[in-house]
């Protein structure tokens, strides 16, 4: 409907609103600015047949808005389009009050009529929100005189940008007027009962979004600017006066297994929000279950949790499926004298295994005593009332070494088995090799030392590196490599044993070691076929060309070498088996 607010009345409203706005802002703690430009789009007089299209556009743009709705307004209003309010609520928009019949001039009516016009819409809003909240009111025509401010028991929201969309009914005009008037902290007035208004508003949102604006509800705008709305007080905008709070964050869902089930807790870092949750596909709202404390579950449950403040502003929704059953510990393995022994730390659990590479189930072979494993043996632990354990895969190399992290179908299976058998590389645990772990300077230096046959190191070790513990596994290899000019420290007298080794550094060290062993290192490959050959460091050019020529280093892909990329232990095993074959 048309806003017939006189210039004098609007000026009075602006004056009245500016005083409580500043006072409220001074009472709030000042937070560090997020740098956000905030703007609140508001839509009046609906819902209408055009509102679903508007909601589609807002959703596609990630924008939130406030809907000041009438009870009945011709063919428009809540009574005629009640179902759309549920979508507004679930998509995070603000449901607000524009009085039941849109009476003009509103401030000429008595207190009882004013109160009734507001309360009748409140009942409709509360029904769709699922409960009572502090709704905000926009009076018809922006009227704030007479008994309005003393009667309306809610914050009164006017506007600072009016595109006169009800007058022009032209999408381009609506767009231009909004963009020209937009400013940080603005409240924009539009009507979703006109198709041209919806079209112009969505275009304006696109333009303003490109200018860095964030589109929030009126309640969120006021909160983030440190303004605590007061009943009967008029607000037209919320400029940045030093407080620019961040948006609400999503709640967290945590779970802790116990003897009688799993305890689930929700939490939020945001003050002033109450947590609501569902255990279905429904988005939580004020009518959903209110969180009051830890919840114990004994079956898998999907929780959706949201925080809602007193104005109906919501946090993002967090959804997580939590298993209500306590876990069963993964089987532990022991391999000796050709026999595999399995055990489980969960009392009463049964272990099932397969020896054909298939995934074990309760129908697989029940473990009762040690047995001879095959190349791939898989096992799982199960206990009634508990989750099944992870599947543990035991792989036996061709040389009789058992690993739980070296699959038989992996590209590095043969290399790992061979290099460990040669004693050049060792596992990282009794039954682990950690193939995806990055090789370090300490690891590679130790490998070279092992390749050399672990020679004796003289007493004259020279000055110690500040970060090499004499008792570390790599201490002797580091000093041996330093004595023989294979490795160097850094200018600050450190070796940095845990620093990752790149692919080009691996090539350099192997080339040096090959020369140390008297091997021919003159071969050179043309690396120009690789698109990243220019990324090879100058000191590593010859070594990379040699390593590629003799087949030690190949491209990560058909066209890239990735010389600066870290080398994994699996890659190291592959390279080193190739090197031992050369020597």
Image (spheres, rainbow, N blue to C red):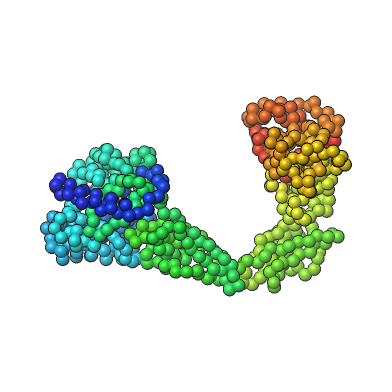
Percent of width and height locating residue 317: 44, 57
At horizontal 76% and vertical 64% (from top left) the residue drawn is 342
Q: Is residue 188 left or right of residue 514?
A: left
Residue 438 at least partly seen: yes
At horizontal 29% and vertical 60% (from top left) the residue drawn is 135
Determine whether 36 is above or below 91 in the image.
above
Q: Is residue 49 left or right of residue 263?
A: left
Percent of width and height locating residue 572: 74, 42
**Which of the two residues, 225 or 462, is positioned nearer the viewer here?**
462
Percent of width and height locating residue 190: 25, 48
Residue 219 at least partly seen: no
**Which of the two residues, 347 or 88, is positioned nearer the viewer here?**
347
Q: Quadrant of residue 93?
A: bottom left
At horizontal 31% and vertical 66% (from top left) the residue drawn is 132
Q: Is residue 473 left or right of residue 153?
A: right
At horizontal 40% and vertical 63% (from top left) the residue drawn is 274
**Which of the two residues, 560 or 446, is positioned nearer the viewer here?**
446
Query: In which quadrant is the C terminus drawn?
Result: top right
């Amino acid at each position: 409907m048309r806003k017939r607010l006189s210039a004098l009345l609007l000026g009075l409203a602006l004056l009245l609103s500016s005083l409580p706005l500043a006072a409220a802002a001074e009472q709030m703690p000042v937070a560090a600015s997020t740098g956000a430009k905030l703007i609140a789009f508001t839509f009046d007089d609906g819902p209408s047949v055009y509102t679903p299209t508007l909601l589609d556009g807002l959703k596609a743009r990630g924008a939130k808005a406030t809907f000041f709705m009438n009870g009945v307004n011709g063919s428009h209003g809540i009574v005629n389009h009640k179902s759309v309010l549920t979508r507004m609520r679930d998509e995070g928009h603000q449901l607000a009050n524009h009085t039941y019949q849109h009476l003009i001039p509103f401030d000429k009516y008595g207190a009882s009529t004013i109160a009734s016009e507001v309360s009748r819409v409140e009942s409709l809003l509360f029904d769709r929100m699922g409960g009572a909240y502090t709704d905000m009111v926009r009076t018809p025509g922006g009227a704030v005189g007479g008994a309005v401010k003393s009667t309306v028991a809610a914050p009164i929201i006017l506007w600072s940008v009016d595109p006169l969309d009800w007058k022009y009914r032209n999408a381009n005009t609506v767009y231009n007027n909004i963009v020209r008037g937009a400013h940080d902290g603005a409240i924009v007035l539009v009507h979703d009962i006109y198709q041209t208004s919806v079209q112009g508003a969505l275009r304006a949102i696109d333009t303003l979004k490109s200018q860095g604006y964030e589109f929030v509800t009126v309640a969120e705008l006021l909160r983030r600017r440190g303004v605590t709305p007061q009943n009967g007080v008029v607000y037209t905008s919320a400029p940045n006066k030093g407080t620019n709070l961040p948006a609400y964050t999503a709640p967290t869902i945590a779970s802790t297994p116990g003897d009688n089930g799993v305890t689930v807790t929700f939490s939020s870092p945001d003050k002033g929000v109450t947590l609501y949750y569902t255990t279905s596909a429904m988005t939580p709202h004020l009518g959903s279950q209110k969180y009051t404390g830890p919840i114990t579950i004994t079956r898998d449950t999907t929780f959706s949790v949201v925080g809602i403040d007193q104005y109906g502003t919501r946090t993002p929704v967090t959804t997580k499926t939590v298993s209500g059953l306590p876990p069963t510990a993964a089987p532990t393995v022991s391999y000796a004298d050709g026999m595999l022994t399995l055990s489980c730390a969960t009392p009463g659990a049964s272990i099932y295994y397969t020896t054909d590479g298939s995934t074990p189930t309760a129908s697989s072979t029940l473990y009762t005593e040690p047995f001879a494993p095959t190349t791939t043996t898989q096992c799982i632990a199960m206990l009634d009332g508990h989750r099944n354990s992870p599947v543990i895969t035991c792989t036996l190399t061709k040389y009789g070494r058992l690993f739980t992290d070296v699959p038989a179908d992996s590209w590095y299976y043969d290399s790992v088995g061979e290099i460990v058998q040669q004693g050049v590389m060792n596992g990282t645990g009794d039954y682990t090799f950690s193939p995806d772990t990055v090789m370090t300077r300490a690891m590679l230096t130790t490998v070279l030392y092992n390749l050399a046959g672990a020679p004796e190191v003289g007493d004259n070790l020279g000055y110690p590196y500040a970060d090499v513990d004499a008792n570390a596994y790599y201490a002797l290899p580091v000093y041996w490599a330093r004595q023989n000019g294979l490795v160097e420290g850094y200018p600050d007298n450190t070796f940095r044993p845990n620093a990752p080794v790149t692919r080009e550094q691996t090539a350099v060290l192997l080339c040096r070691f090959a020369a140390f062993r008297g091997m021919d290192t003159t071969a050179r490959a043309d690396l120009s076929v690789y698109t990243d050959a220019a990324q090879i460091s100058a000191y590593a050019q010859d070594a990379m060309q040699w390593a590629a020529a003799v087949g030690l280093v190949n491209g990560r892909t058909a066209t890239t070498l990735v010389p600066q990329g870290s080398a994994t232990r699996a890659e190291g095993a592959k390279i080193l088996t190739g090197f031992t074959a050369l020597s």
